[in-house]
Amino acid sequence: MTPQRHLPTSRELAVWRAYLESFEAVRARVDARLHRDSDLSSGDYKILLALSEAESHELRSSELAAHILWERSRLSAHLGRMEKRGLVRRAPCPDDARGAIAVLTEAGRRAFRDSTIPHLEAIRSLFVDALTPDQLVVVGDIATALHDHLSTEHPVRP
Amino acid sequence: MTPQRHLPTSRELAVWRAYLESFEAVRARVDARLHRDSDLSSGDYKILLALSEAESHELRSSELAAHILWERSRLSAHLGRMEKRGLVRRAPCPDDARGAIAVLTEAGRRAFRDSTIPHLEAIRSLFVDALTPDQLVVVGDIATALHDHLSTEHPVRP
DNA sequence: TCCATATGATTGACATGTCAACCACTAGGG
DNA sequence: CCCTAGTGGTTGACATGTCAATCATATGGA
């Protein structure tokens, strides 16, 4: 709470850099496997997952964006690309003429279904298998601590 | 070592997702502050840091790429943008007529110098302060474990 | 009803990332 | 010396990300 500002020690900085690098590396490897095995990006997968879990395999654009924590413009562009590839289609929203509904196509359902097992195996083999069960629990705690810290502290100043 | 394949449990998967999300959130926040405070992206910072630490504030392109673990094409494009903004300039390499040397300009030195303290403060306030000292040590261990696992296991198959 | 304002979604301009193709030059064997 | 293979770097095509502006519609008072 003191306004006294101090800088991270070189030890703390080294941890930050190791954290950055290891995370980037793991994520890149998981994404590369998903792309190679299923020709899907992590964004594609995230959207297919959300739609697959949704009622009737469809979601209002803004709800989908909120669910996966994406900006609407980002989602709009991504849905455009996925629509071109036949994974989703967009339908007008009956309740609200402004709205759009993203609907999973049959090809989208199939792509998601076929990608799931290899993707989960990649997560296990590249992430879960790298850590002891204890470490895995701690990672969960740390993720929670980081998340809570961001939520309660240090908002982005306008 | 058994070829028996299994999928992550829902607990393990939840840790993976929490890890992904918290990491993305912290990184986005740190990057946003760097951009707001110093008008630099994390890529700009990485390059400025590497050049600042180098002999004569300059590096052969390929050495720079190797140092920061970037593909050459990625570095080439990024240097092009930074050159346009006056942060670096490119000089021909005397030893090897194919080569290019990236040199920090005076503006680049100044931009890096002015950005460092606020950036380190952001890392402290958004990352270091979120964790207990014990947790910070564990993050380091986990980063090491992930890195080693990737290096020794599961190469990307061709 | 009518209008001011808010909301849902798309678009455009640009930064950033990957990948493959390309070009210029180097290097090493004949 | 010459030719071929490799290396260093750039480029082009495209996917992905941010942000601000725009457009149509909705909504809640005057």
Image: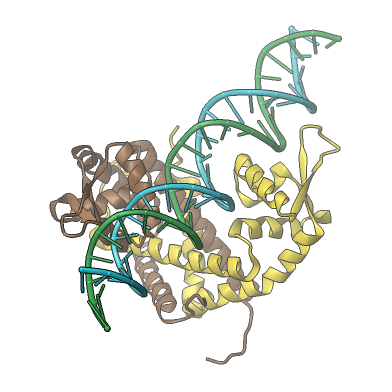
Chain colours: A yellow, B brown, C green, D cyan
Q: Give the answer, above or below, for where A63 lies relative to B150.
A: above
Give percent across and percent down for residue C20.
50, 62
For this rendering, which residue is in front, B44 or C22? C22
Give percent across and percent down for residue A59.
76, 48
Q: Give the answer, above or below, for where B14 lies relative to B42.
A: below
Tell me if A5 is positioned left or right of C21 in this view: left
Tell me if A127 is positioned left or right of B32 in this view: right
**Residue extending farthest bottom:** B2
* Residue B42 in view in this figure: no
Q: Give the answer, above or below, for where B50 lies relative to A1.
A: below
For this rendering, which residue is in front, B40 or A81? A81
Give percent across and percent down for residue A68.
63, 52
Q: Residue at x 55, y 61 (%)?
A: B18
Q: Residue at x 55, y 65 (%)?
A: A31
Disc tally is 0
For this rendering, which residue is in front, A24 or A130? A24
Give percent across and percent down for residue B74.
40, 54
For this rendering, which residue is in front, B77 or B11? B77
Q: Residue at x 27, y 54 (%)?
A: A8
* Residue A146 in view in this figure: yes
**Residue extending farthest left:** B56
Q: Give the answer, above or below, for where B61 lies relative to A60.
A: below
Q: Residue at x 36, y 42 (%)?
A: B81
Tell me if C5 is positioned left or right of B48 in this view: right
